[in-house]
Structures are given as structure tokens and as C-alpha cells.
Image (spheres, coloured by chain):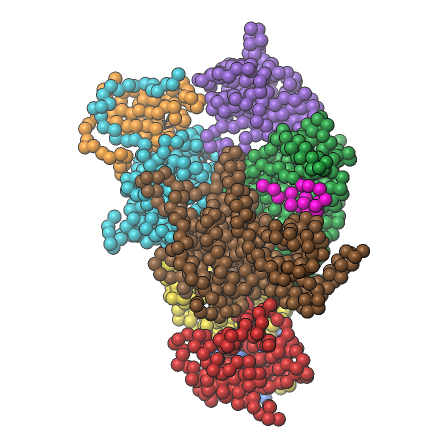
Chain colours: A blue, B orange, C yellow, D cyan, E green, F brown, G purple, H red
Amino acid sequence: MTKSSGHIIINIQKCKGCELCIIECPQNGMALSSNINQNGYHYAYLAEDICTGCTNCALICPEAIIKVYRKKKSKILKQPVSTL
Amino acid sequence: MTKSSGHIIINIQKCKGCELCIIECPQNGMALSSNINQNGYHYAYLAEDICTGCTNCALICPEAIIKVYRKKKSKILKQPVSTL
Amino acid sequence: MSISQEGIHCNYLNEMDLVWDRPDTFTDTTLHYCPGCGHSVINRLIMESVQELNIEEKTIGVAPVGCSVFAYHYMFIDMQEAAHGRASAVATGIKRILPDRIVFSYQGDGDLAAIGTAETIHTVNRGENILMLFINNGIYGMTGGQMSPTTLKGSITSTSPDGRDYNQHGYPLDITKIIAQMPGSAYVTRQSVDSANAVRKTKKAMMKSLKYQMDGGRGVCFIEIVSNCPSGWKMTPTESNEWLRNEIFNHYELGDIKQLPKLKTNEI
Amino acid sequence: MSISQEGIHCNYLNEMDLVWDRPDTFTDTTLHYCPGCGHSVINRLIMESVQELNIEEKTIGVAPVGCSVFAYHYMFIDMQEAAHGRASAVATGIKRILPDRIVFSYQGDGDLAAIGTAETIHTVNRGENILMLFINNGIYGMTGGQMSPTTLKGSITSTSPDGRDYNQHGYPLDITKIIAQMPGSAYVTRQSVDSANAVRKTKKAMMKSLKYQMDGGRGVCFIEIVSNCPSGWKMTPTESNEWLRNEIFNHYELGDIKQLPKLKTNEI
Amino acid sequence: MNKKILMKGNEALAEAAIRAGLKGYFGYPITPQSEILEYLSRHLVGSNRVFLQAESEVAAINMVYGAAGCGERVMTSTSSPGFSLMQEGISYIACAELPCLLVNVVRGGPGLGTIQPSQGDYFQAVKGGGHGDYKLLVYAPNSVQEMADFVYKGFDAADKYRTPVLILTDGALGQMMEPVVFPDYNPDNHYTNHSAWATRGKSKNRDPNVITTLNLEADAMEKTNIHLQAKYKSIMENEVMFETIETEDADFLLIAFGLTSRIAHKALEMARENNIKVGLLRPQTLFPFPTQAIAELAENVQAILTIEMNAGQMVEDVRLAVNGRTPVYFYGRMGGVIPQPNEIYQKIKDVYHSSSKQISE
Amino acid sequence: MNKKILMKGNEALAEAAIRAGLKGYFGYPITPQSEILEYLSRHLVGSNRVFLQAESEVAAINMVYGAAGCGERVMTSTSSPGFSLMQEGISYIACAELPCLLVNVVRGGPGLGTIQPSQGDYFQAVKGGGHGDYKLLVYAPNSVQEMADFVYKGFDAADKYRTPVLILTDGALGQMMEPVVFPDYNPDNHYTNHSAWATRGKSKNRDPNVITTLNLEADAMEKTNIHLQAKYKSIMENEVMFETIETEDADFLLIAFGLTSRIAHKALEMARENNIKVGLLRPQTLFPFPTQAIAELAENVQAILTIEMNAGQMVEDVRLAVNGRTPVYFYGRMGGVIPQPNEIYQKIKDVYHSSSKQISE
Amino acid sequence: MKFEIIIAGFGGQGVLSMGMSLAYAAMIEGKEVSWMPSYGPEMRGGTANCNIIISSKPISSPIINTFDLVVALNQPSLNKFEKQIRDGGYLLYEKDQIINPPTITQISIFGISATKEAVKLENKKAMNMVMLGAVLAIEPIVSVGSILKALEKVLPSRHHHLIPLNKKALLMGQKLIQPFFGN
Amino acid sequence: MKFEIIIAGFGGQGVLSMGMSLAYAAMIEGKEVSWMPSYGPEMRGGTANCNIIISSKPISSPIINTFDLVVALNQPSLNKFEKQIRDGGYLLYEKDQIINPPTITQISIFGISATKEAVKLENKKAMNMVMLGAVLAIEPIVSVGSILKALEKVLPSRHHHLIPLNKKALLMGQKLIQPFFGN
Ligand SMILES: Cc1ncc(C[n+]2csc(CCOP(=O)(O)OP(=O)(O)O)c2C)c(N)n1
Ligand SMILES: Cc1ncc(C[n+]2csc(CCOP(=O)(O)OP(=O)(O)O)c2C)c(N)n1
Ligand code: SF4
Ligand code: SF4
Ligand code: SF4
Ligand code: SF4
Ligand code: SF4
Ligand code: SF4
Ligand SMILES: [Mg+2]
Ligand SMILES: [Mg+2]
């Protein structure tokens, strides 16, 4: 149950285990599972409750399978959010 | 009968009458004939006895049909003479 | 059996804003690219940009053969798949016929800088009003890792088994520099997608280029993205990105090469 | 009926030296070029150079289609006639197989800078050890005067009836500048043959380039010769040369663009 | 009545294209077809009409691919070496089912060859050409009038079948002037709305349109091929065009297309004057080929003589049609040489006598 | 005895080329033939041997033109779309009479198609392809062993006739491994001195050698063509190669080349087990085609079934050979699909029954 | 009726438009016509020619190798085509462009100084119309009136003011031929 | 005798060389063989496979759609090929790579943890040889000795020192199959 200001949800069945998100997380909050998904890939997951919702992992993820949430209420944005 | 220090001989049957040699002669010694050659071209000729043998006309002549002679004896050169 | 999540769970998602999600214009299809391949990111970025600018209905993309040959499976817009090397000629045909549409090509280094060199140079020389995306991974990814014109000196590929050698194979071709010096290019930049920040910058370049085209700007916008090919390079994705930063960017320096001209009608 | 001379006659020819004559390597065949065409001069100059360097027996020339397609009628050396645009690829094939021969290509602007752009760029990029002669008359002479990539703005040709217009036709392509910036070129110069002095300079550039190749120098020597096309331009030869000096050279500035590197083994 | 104008074949073709609603032309100069470019550079003007001189034939055919993919009437033209360079692109266009008009003003080959008229590209046009199983619908005009007429037919057929159409002509027909009358033709009445498949920007209410020729799975690629073959079959059933001259009572049949057919016609007259009952069949479409008509005529003639400006190409299609029913002879000139009427007449006499001998034997 | 080695078809072909004295290779990557490049990039090394990856297939074929013009053994290889791009260059090479080896490892077309094996480029190889009247001498291997063997044959024939030779194979034969034995072959014993015509630098005692395909005068160009046609005639007389299997007592004949012939062979076995007397003729050269042999067999069989991995291309040459003597049927799969033995067997049964019915009727 | 003619000379001499005017005039008169230029690298060397066939019946081959009439405007053209004239045919040439006059027999030969006449009309370019007038005097294939109508089609409208001049030239050409028949 | 087998998995798992070793060994034993890889854009997605035909008679089609034995080294391969096994055929798979085990019947199924065993041998890459040992235990197409001889050809000489390790892996693979037959 997260206490941090952000959160991510990964569509792990589509993860290819490239680990780029893990490298890119400034909080070092992510890790690669020792389990595999249906395609035989070890997948990434949020391992520590320190996510800030910075979107780095989502931006680098080649499979575009990371949803990022952030606590601090902002005005509702149309999808997808500009990263400019 | 030339008195000047140079002379040219043009293969006039091959001349195409482009007049480039005439323009290029620093002595203004050349002219275009009012006669035509076997191909129907008015041809160039040395009109005034003021040729210095500078080779300009020969160098510019697209048809490469101008032989240039120069009076002042130089050591015998192999053909063709370097224009460098 | 289906695992859906692992690790930290959050009960307060409804108190949070969804701040990043896959764009709608980027279909749900699983990408065929190898794990960690930059193509995936770049495919997505151009669709993000199209969507944000609300031009899905007037954008036509052109991707030739190369690893990105299936791009039309992911990009939810009208697209043409071009013969190897001819994307910019195809894009020219489209843009000339439909000048008010937004047209981009998406080409690899084998495509744009080898077989398609003439089309590339002349598309730029004519100053076609299109965006050209140039994905330079220094290799023929699709066909199994042969040397490309942009492969760096010493690199071992399946057709340069002893490494690229200037005497035998020639020099890495800096086609982007050539394009930048041509009057037909409006904007020329070299970017990458090896980090989140690089991704942000690349997207910015795409947005700028598309807006310029929307506003009737004249000339080719050209974005080179120096990217990886983990499979062709025989590296892990992480290694490949490090290789980019430690070796490749030294040769292919990132950054804007030719600034976008200000449009008289409309400042972007 | 045959007239043999007119004007001044000279009785003392035997007291004079023959200081200029048609070179032996340049056959006696009447040239098919139009009156005043620069091709004729350039054809001769390369043969003069080959002869002076005594390399008739090891030189192989390549001329593609274009007005100079019959160059092999005039050049008394082994030659190959190449498909349109492919002279530098053909020359590459020859030079790679016979690396100790001297190889040159002789190409027009349509050939080298339009259809053959890819071959041109990549021959230079590989740094082939050949001499490329680029006869830029800004038009497709052979096919009757269509616009070429190097045609200047405003010029009327048979396919740009209202003059070349940047928006429709693009910009005059400065391929020589592109080549100069590539590491595969050893020497890049832009010359002309519109005056006797220009002819001298062009020949000097040819001699330098051939010597460099003879001495095993690496990389392409590239000589652009900005030339005329009286027929295509619809001018007299004299007018065409004036046009060169008054208009064309302003855009295509003459002179060396990239100096020949000094060879370590042998100073030229 | 529409006016008779004296025009070059190449220009009549170009003018007809404009009148047929041409939206885009992409081409590259080459003799003997450069007049098509030159004419269009002057006259294909005005809003939404594009004339573009490409950097090469390869670029031109791929521009046509892109432009045809937008569903507009577009074309290119070239001559033999340039047509060879287009083969990859044409294979793509055929596979992607893009309607467009191609023109090959043939000259004598192989290689650089001559610029004189030839029919040496028959095989390339009708059989081989690019890789894979595809066909072009091929029209072969024999006059300046048909140079124009077949442009309208060509665009209409291209639209109808979503297929590239080729006008196979030659340097003589392209360069010569003859009187021509342009028929009334309002492109709007022939307009085919291609927006169902063309890439013009994905409107809200449909999925993306994709122009592609790729099918990594062989099974899917076979389906594409089956679809193409079905289309070609329907073309064979509906689009055959040919002309017959004095075939009713003929016991000797000439077959020739394009320019050659005019010379054969002259030879026919010479033969008829000498009481040899010669008829002439002229295919106006080369694919589809008038196989049926030839097979039927073959039943009634003692021999067939095919005349071409090549080493013998269409004669194979004639033989396939005849299938042994009667002897098939061939007379051809190559490399840009045009056969003269008397040569053909001589050949008719030779064959006629030997074949009637055969028969009486 | 020479050793048996397990090798890929593409690699066996490349290795054979090296052993045949290959001096220069110029090519461009494309699946399913890239192994030829890759193998040669590793093994075609050492003094005076050139491996060069060109910037395109167009450049590659023109490098071959230049290199072959120097009189050395040179080659290129590609797959279908790349072969289309080479057509202009090939027409030039044929016209300039330059000996060289071309390889097309065919994949399913048209367009980008699949990368699976196909025989869809038969027409392109044998009839059309580039512009003008020329022919390639075309070998069609059906095993990895022949992928090697035909390289030697190919270079020898190219040298002998001064003509480009094509090995037409497919993705399956290129990619698969089978045992192969390399014959003893010393290129020096096969060496043809080409210096009489090749451009290697004009020695003092001769006039310049010129490689050209240009003849502005149609008459001269026709002479070139007559010379080429005479050469092709001599090739047709001397170079036909084919294999027959159980044709002696056959009353039903299969005709297939390359990979398909192996599957047809299997179907033949199935038919023979069921007492249908099937024979198989396999052309090993596609030009020259075994016309004579087929015509003779056609006299004795009730029907012929041609099997191809295309929409029906070689079957036209079969029909031309048969000339109506017996019915000719066709079975084909397209776009990269390989027919299975039982499909063919089924087709044999269908045709066999209908044709024997026909005959008994 | 069938008449086959070739007109040959330098590029700038108006060879092609001379032929075109003739063909157009014949078309106006309801005849079948074809006009075929030499084509291709005609620029180089600067020579050009066109042949015209005028016939009452449909025309088969538009390319012909023998002619009823050859019009030679320069020496190379004369050298090239004089042998291709049919027995009983005609050769018309521009006298001042020719230094080696024709030697063949079995045909009628007409040499005229058309350029000089055109210069007199103060338009050197009208030389081709002088020649065309001469053609019509040799063989009245079409009327001068039809040529004038044809010129309205062949000339761009900015040159229509030259038609009266061209008429003069045509008539002059006809006149130059009269002495030959006078003999 | 004829045996048709496909080996499929990720690119890095040694799929192609495993098949090649088997084919080479069969050739050494005098059999007819063919080996056919999946080819083309196999890089993308990272899957690879090859099929091997071993026969006492010449081999017709080298491309086959049904198999006597499928070796699946990952889940997608298992999903793709399990339906192409002939009745009475075999399926061998790497247990730890599979989360959805096979469900088909009419065939014999063997799941083994080859990677774990290879790790025990301190060379994860030897996994493919463990699998190959298992294949030979299921159907003794060739002898282990022939495989070892084949490895001398298939492996570049710089890797020949690994042959003893591979031998261990092969034997280990054979052992892992024994319990299945023990049942
Ligand atoms: C005419 C032609 N030649 C070659 C090929 C084979 N081919 C397909 S993609 C490709 C190059 C891929 O390299 P690149 O453009 O750099 O794209 P990448 O796969 O690296 O993204 C090649 C050579 C082809 N399809 N068509
Ligand atoms: C494939 C092909 N396309 C077109 C042509 C026609 N063609 C011959 S030369 C030429 C261009 C000539 O221009 P350039 O190269 O500038 O030479 P120039 O005649 O001006 O010296 C063209 C388009 C051809 N022969 N082959
Ligand atoms: S959003 Fe940022 S902090 Fe949260 S997991 Fe992703 S990279 Fe780490
Ligand atoms: S970046 Fe995406 S695909 Fe890669 S490991 Fe992370 S979630 Fe998986
Ligand atoms: S050599 Fe010099 S001076 Fe003499 S004619 Fe020629 S240009 Fe004039
Ligand atoms: S330059 Fe030569 S061709 Fe020209 S006028 Fe002078 S002599 Fe004649
Ligand atoms: S081969 Fe390379 S470029 Fe292609 S998808 Fe795989 S990693 Fe990306
Ligand atoms: S057309 Fe132009 S380039 Fe060609 S020969 Fe004539 S003047 Fe020279
Ligand atoms: Mg790449
Ligand atoms: Mg030019």
C-alpha cells in the first residue's frame, strides 16, 4: 500500500525485460522479477515504495506499457499528457 | 609571308566556326571567313600578321585543330608540349 | 495463471492523476521489435506528437522496409509502406498531391543513407515540406546485422568481420551534416532516445517539426535519432545504450545542427 | 575544291618550333560535339594529361551516357561506356579489380548529380582512388536541354518553361561542396575552360590528380568543370562563355575547394 | 465535331492525359519520350496539378507509388533503359493495387542501344519485368490517334481494376506527327472515388488505410496472389481489344502490333494485289492477349506470320494461342530497324509458297 | 575422395565461387541471400580478391559491369526486389557481352512480399527482365550440391560465351543445409584469356578496347543483335541440361525445376506406389530450355503436369515445346508457399483420371 | 497520290517548322499526312531533318528511306540524302551552303540562293519559306493558301504578324524555280 | 527410416547449433539429412527455430509442417508448434521457461529443467546439449559419439575445449529422460 507521491502500473505480460526502466528510475525503485511472463520474459516491477511519478520509466519503456500516476492533484489533462 | 614571332595553321575543314579562338587571341589577329568549309561552317583564319605563338587560340579551340609555331628556337620538345 | 502485478500495490489510485499512458494513436498491438530497441520508442513518440497536435486525420506516414516495416501496425493513421530506400520519393508523391496533409517518412540508415541516398539528397534539395525521421542505428537491423554506411570505424558486423576499415569500406557517412548544409532543409537536429531526457528532447523536435509543417513552413525538417540495435550489436539493451553514450555520440554529436527558421506568418 | 588555308601565309615554318599540336592520344576523329562546346576541350585536356604522364597504357576511362557518350571515339585508351549515372560505380569495379591502373570517370551534371547521386556520394565516401571529372553545364545536353539539378534559379529550360523556381524545382545542387566536406575526397576543385588561362588551370588540376593517383594517393580527386552548352542554352559559343563569366561563376565560384594532401611517400 | 490537330504522338498522349484529369506526373528525361515531360511541364499547370521532374526513373516510379496511393490519376513515362529501372517499383505498384498509367516509348536495345523505334520490350511488358507474379494491362497504339485514345481507356481501366496500366509504344509513334481528334471526355463522369482505400488522412469513422505489399506469412502472401490472379482473369475476360483486317476470307494470317501493324497492312495490300488472300490481326491489348480470336482464326488459315521489331517475342503468345493448329512463322528486325513493306511481302510469298506446298504434299 | 561437408546452400555457392577463382564480388544485403555476402566477406580475402558491399543493387550490378569488363571472374547475388533493380544493368552487361555470374535467391513476390521461397521470377529470368532482346544462361539447382556445382558450370559458360549467367534458386535452397562435396577444380585450367577485348590498359600493339552498348545507327545496332542471337542459338544447341526420372515407361509426365522438382519426385513415388506410371523431367537449364526432350516425351504421354511455385510461368515454355501434342496441366502455389507432395499427388490423380477418360472417350 | 519528302539542314535553319507547315497544309486539304523528325542527339553536330508523307490513302510506315524530293539546306545533308532520291525524283538545295554540288543523275536538281532572298526580305529566318515556295513550284502538293492557313497553327500567335512576310517568301521561292522550267 | 524434428526457442538459446550438431552427426552416420532454419526477420522478437530431417532415403521437401518431435525452449515456441506434432510423436520442452504447460494429447510429453542442469555444469550455454541428450534418449536417432564428432565440425576450433563439457551435458540430458520411461 503505497505511501509515496507516485505510482506505476506495468502491463507485465507485454514486458520484454529490457531493464531500461530499471536503469532510468531516479529512485532506483524498480527491479526485474525472477518470474517470467507468458512470453518467457522476466518482467519489471515496482519494488520499492518510493515512486515519485516522474514518468522516466514510462518514457523510456519501448513497449509503452507503464502507466504513471501522481498524487498531487493537477487539473485534469487530456490523454496523452504532454511531456514537453 | 609572316614577319611576326609566331604562326598558326588551322585545319579549316574541321573548323566549326565557334569563334572562340578569335575572342581569345590577345593580338586580335584572327577572323572568321565569309567562306564556308565542306561542312557548311564559316571557318577561322589568321587575318593579321601579328601572331606571337602564345597558344591561346589552340588551347581554347574545341576541335583541337590549331597548330601553333613560334620563332624563337627552344630545345626540341616531345609532343604534345606541356601547357602547365 | 495470469499474473497481473508484482511488487508494490496501491489502493489510492483514484486519488491520483494518471499522468502518463500509452497514446491512443499508438495501437495496442505488441511490438515486434527486439527487447530494448529504440524503434519502439520512436514509433510511439511520433504518434504521441501527432495526437497532441490533433492531426491524426491529416497525417500520412511512410515507412520503408527495415525493422520498422511493420510500423503501420502500431501507428493508427494512414500509412504507406515504401520500397527499400524510396520513402522520401513516396512521401514526395504524397505531399505534392495532397499539399495540405502532414507527411513524414521514417527511415533507417541502410534505407536513407545507402540505397536511398539519391532520393534523400534530392528530396531535401527540392525542399519538400515534409518531416524526415532518420533512425540511425549504424547497422542493417532487419537483414541480420550487416555493415551500413554509418557504421563506425572498427565495428564488427556480419559483413565487416574484421571491423570497419576505412581503406576497404570507406568512412562513416554523415548524411545529416550534408543535409544541414543544403538550402532545402529547414531544421536539422540529431537526437537520441537512450534516456528519459533524450526522449523528451526528441519529442520536442518532432513537435516543432510538425507544427512548422502545419503552419505551412517550407523545407524538410530532418531529425536524426542515433539509436541502438541490441540484436545487431550483440549487446543487452542496457549495454547498447551505454555504447551509444560512450562511443557513438562521440562521433555523431547530439544537438541541433540547423535551427528552425522563424515563420513570418506564425511564430511557433 | 578543297580550300586548305586562308589569310596570312608563312614561308619560314621550318625556322619555327611547333609549340602546340593535337595530342596523339586524342584521335583524329571529328568531334560530334556542337560548335564551341566545352566537352571537346575537356576531352582533349584529359588525353593531353594522360599522354604527358605517359600512362596511356595503364589508364582506363569511364564515360556514361550524356553528350560525351562518344568520348571513346576520341580518347585513344581503353574505355568503358557506363549506364546513365553509374560511371563511378563502374569505375569502382575497375579500380578495385585493377588497383594499379589509373582510372577516371567523366560525367555530366544530370549523370553525376541527379540519377547517379547515390553512386557519386558513396564512391567518394569509400574514398575510391580514382579521378572524377564532373562536367557541369547546368543542363541535360544530350536529351535536348532539360533542367538539371545544377540549373540556376530562373533559368528557362525545356522542362522549366517559366524558369527554375525554388518552390517547384528546388535549389541548384552544389554537389561539389558536399564532396569536399567528405573525408573520402582527397582533392576537390572547381575549374572552367572558358578561356585559355582557365584551360591551363584545368589541365594543371588534371595533372595533379593523375600524379596523385599514380603515386598511390588515397581518395577521390574531384574536378568540377563549370562548362557551357551553347545548344541547350540557345546561345552562341561566345555568348555562352560570357554567360558563364557573368552569371554562372557568381553562383559556382571557381577555385580549389579542398587542397590535395601531401603524400608522405612522394611529394607531387 | 472536335477539331483535327496535327500533333506528335508524345504530345497527343500528354494532352490526352491532361484531358483525362491527370493530377500528377513524375518522370525523367530520356529520348524518345522527353516531349511528354516537356509538354506537361508547360501544360500540366494550375491548382492541384503536379508536374515534377524526378532525379531518376527509380525516384519517379516511387513518387507515382506515393501519389497513386492517394487515389488520384497519376502517371509516368520513360523509354527502355528507364523502364528497366522502374521494374522494382512497378512490381510494388501492381502488388499494392495502385491505379496509374505507365508509358514506355520503346527504343532499340539491349543496353544503351539506339534511340530508334523498337518492340524489344514486349516480354518485359507482358511477361517478366519485375519480380513475382503480376501483370500490367498493356495497350499498344499504332497511330497518334490511338496514342491519345488509349490514355483515356488506360486511366479508366486502371481505376476500374485498381491496377497499373502500360501504354507500350515506340520512338516512331512518339516522335511522328499525325492528325488527331480528342474525344469529348469529362473526367468527372469517370471519377472513381478511391477514398475507401487511399491514404488521404484517416477520417474519424474508419480504420487507417495502409498501402503495403508485405506479408511475411507465406499463406497471407498467397492470398494476395490469388486475389491478383482473379483480377487478371477478369481483365482477360473483359478487356481484350484487337482489330482484324480482311480476315474473313484469308487463308494466310499476319499478326503484328503497334507500328509494325501499319507496315504489315501495307504488305497485306501488296499481297492482295497479287491474289494472295492475306488477313491481318492486330492486338491492341498485349495483356490481355487476343488468344481466343487467334485460336479461332488459326483453324482457317494455312499459316500465320508474326511480324515484330524484335527477335521474336509476341510470337510466343501467338504460338501459345495457336497451339499447333497451324504453322506459325516469324519475321523480325532488331535494334531500331523498321521492317519495310516489301520485306514483309517477300516473306509472305516465301512462307505462303512453302506452306501451301506443305499442305499439298 | 573429396570430403562431404554439411553446408547452407548460400554458403556452398559462395565457397564454390571462391574455388572457381572468383576475383570480385559486389552485392547488397537482402534476405534470403545475405549469407552469400557474409560468407564472402570472411573468405574472399587475400591479394587481388575483392569483396565489396555496394550502396545498392543498382551500384552492385554496375560495379560488376566495370569489373567484368576487366576480364576477371566476378559476380553478384541478390533476391527478387534487388534483382528487379538490376535489370537495366543486366541488359547492359548482356549487350556488352561481359562474362559474369548473377545469383537470384528468389522469394515470394510481387512487391516486398515474403522472404519465403518462390519461383515467381522465372519469367523475369528467362524472358523479360531488362529491356531489349537478350538472354541469360539460366541454371536452376535443386540441391545444395548443385548450388555449388552450377557455379563452376556457370563461370565456365560465362567465359566461353562472353555472357552473363544466372543461377536462379530460392530461399529454401539458399538457407537449408545439406551435405555437399566440392569437386576438384583448378581455375587455372579453366582460365580464359580475355585480354583481347577487356579494358586492362591499352598495350602498345593494339587499338583501344572499348566496352560499350551504344550504336546510334539502327543498322549497326541490329548487327549487334544478330550477333547476340547467333550466340544464343549456339547456347541452345550446346548447353541444354535436364534430368529425367522414370520417364521410360511413363504415360504421365511431371515437369518441375529447382526445389519443386524434389517435391514432385516425392509425389512421383507416391503415384508409382499406386500404379500410376509417372515420370519426371527436370530442366537444369531454364534457358536454354529442354524443348526438344519435352517435345519427344510429349509424343508418348497422355498428359503433362507442370508444377511451380508461381502462378504458371515455365508452363508456357512447356506448352511451346509440346505444341498441342498432349494436354498440359499446371499446379502452382504462390507467394512463398511450397506445395506439399500429397497436394501434387492429388493433382496427378485428378488429371490422370480426367485425361485417361478423355483418351478413352 | 503519295508524295514523300525529306528536309534536312542545320538546327537553326527552320527545318522542322518548314516540314510542319507543309504537313499541316496537306492535312487542311484533307490529305493523310505524317511528319517524322530525326530525333535524339540531334543537338550535337547541329543537324536536323524531318520527312513528310502526304497521301490520299492511310499511311503505313512513317519512316522512309527513299524520297520523291530531298531538300538539303547544307552540305552534310546533301551528302547524306542525295543517294536516297528515287529515279525521277527531285533535289532542291540551298546553293550558298553547298561547296560540293550534287553529282547524281536520273533526277532533277534545283539549287537556289534562298538565304540571300530572305536577307532581301530583311528576315534571314524566312529562308525556309523561300525553300518551301520552291518546293511547291517543283511539285504543287498543296496550295500557298493552305500553307498560310497552316502557319496560323504552326506559329505561336506572337509571331502571326510575320505571316505576310512569309507569304512573300513563299512566292519568291516559287519564282526562283521558274527559270529551271524555263530551260 | 525418416525422422522429422523442429527445435525452437529464443535466439540466444543455441537452437540453430543444436540442430546443426544433430544433422551433422546423422550425416557422419551416413544418413541423408537436411537442416532448415527459420529465416529472415528472426532477429526481431528474438525467436528462432530450425527443422531437421534425417532419412535413409533422399529427402524431397526440406520444409515440413508436421513433426515427429518438437523441442520447445520457450513459451511462444511451444504455443506455435505443439499442434504440429504427429499422432504418436513427442514434445520435449524446457520446463522453467514454460508457464502454460502443453495440453494436447495423442503424443508423449517430456518437460525437463535443462537450464538448471547446465548451470550445475557451470555453463548455462550447455543447456542446448542437455536438451539434445534428452532428444537422443527419447529417440536414439544418432549416437552420442557421432554428436561429439559433429561438434568438432560445428564448433569453431577455439571452442573445442568445451567438448568434454558438452559430453557431460548430453549424458545429463539422457539421464533426465529416464524417469519418464521409468513410469
Ligand atoms: C531492393 C531491396 N534491397 C534490399 C532489401 C533488404 N533489406 C531490407 S531492410 C534493409 C536494410 C535495413 O537497414 P536499415 O534501413 O538501417 O533499417 P534497420 O532495420 O536497421 O532499422 C535491407 C537491406 C530489400 N528489402 N529491398
Ligand atoms: C536510365 C536512363 N535514363 C535517362 C537516359 C537519357 N539520358 C541520356 S544522357 C542524359 C542526361 C544528360 O545530361 P548530363 O549528364 O548533364 O550530360 P550532358 O549531356 O549535359 O553533357 C539523360 C537523361 C538514359 N540514357 N538512361
Ligand atoms: S515514475 Fe519515476 S520514480 Fe516512479 S517508478 Fe517510474 S521512473 Fe521511478
Ligand atoms: S522498459 Fe518496459 S519492457 Fe523494458 S523492462 Fe521496463 S517495463 Fe519491461
Ligand atoms: S597563337 Fe596567340 S597570338 Fe597567335 S593567333 Fe593564336 S592566340 Fe593569337
Ligand atoms: S576555336 Fe577552333 S573550331 Fe572554333 S572557330 Fe576557332 S578554329 Fe574554328
Ligand atoms: S534487429 Fe535491431 S533495430 Fe531491428 S528490432 Fe531488433 S534491435 Fe531493433
Ligand atoms: S548539346 Fe550542349 S553539351 Fe551537348 S554537345 Fe551540344 S553544346 Fe555540348
Ligand atoms: Mg539501421
Ligand atoms: Mg549536363
Q: Is residue E320 magenta?
A: yes
Residue G126 shown left or right of residue C174 in the figure: right
The correct choice, above or below, for G123 with respect to E239 in the image is above
* Residue furthest to the right: F361
Closest to the observer, F164 or G154? F164
Depth check: F129 or E73 in front?
F129
Task: Say which quadrant the C terminus of chain H sits in.
Answer: bottom right
Image: E151 above or below D218: above
Query: Dividing the image into 4 quarters, which one contains the N terminus of chain H?
Result: bottom right
Which quadrant of the structure image shows residue G172?
top right
Task: Name the residue located 73 percent from the left edge and 64 percent from the top edge.
Answer: F349
Residue H156 visible: yes
**Coordinates of residue C82 in the picture (x, y in percent):** 58, 57
D19 displayed left or right of A50:
left
Q: Nearer the viewer, residue D86 or A21?
A: D86
Task: Tell me which segment is drawn in magenta.
Answer: E311-328
The answer to which of F209 and G37 lies nearer the viewer is F209
Which residue lies at the image location 56% right of the left edge and 43% below the top edge? F133
Q: Position of residue E300 (x, y in %)?
A: 76, 39
Give yes or no for residue E254 being in the magenta stretch.
no
Residue at point 50% right, 88% down?
H172
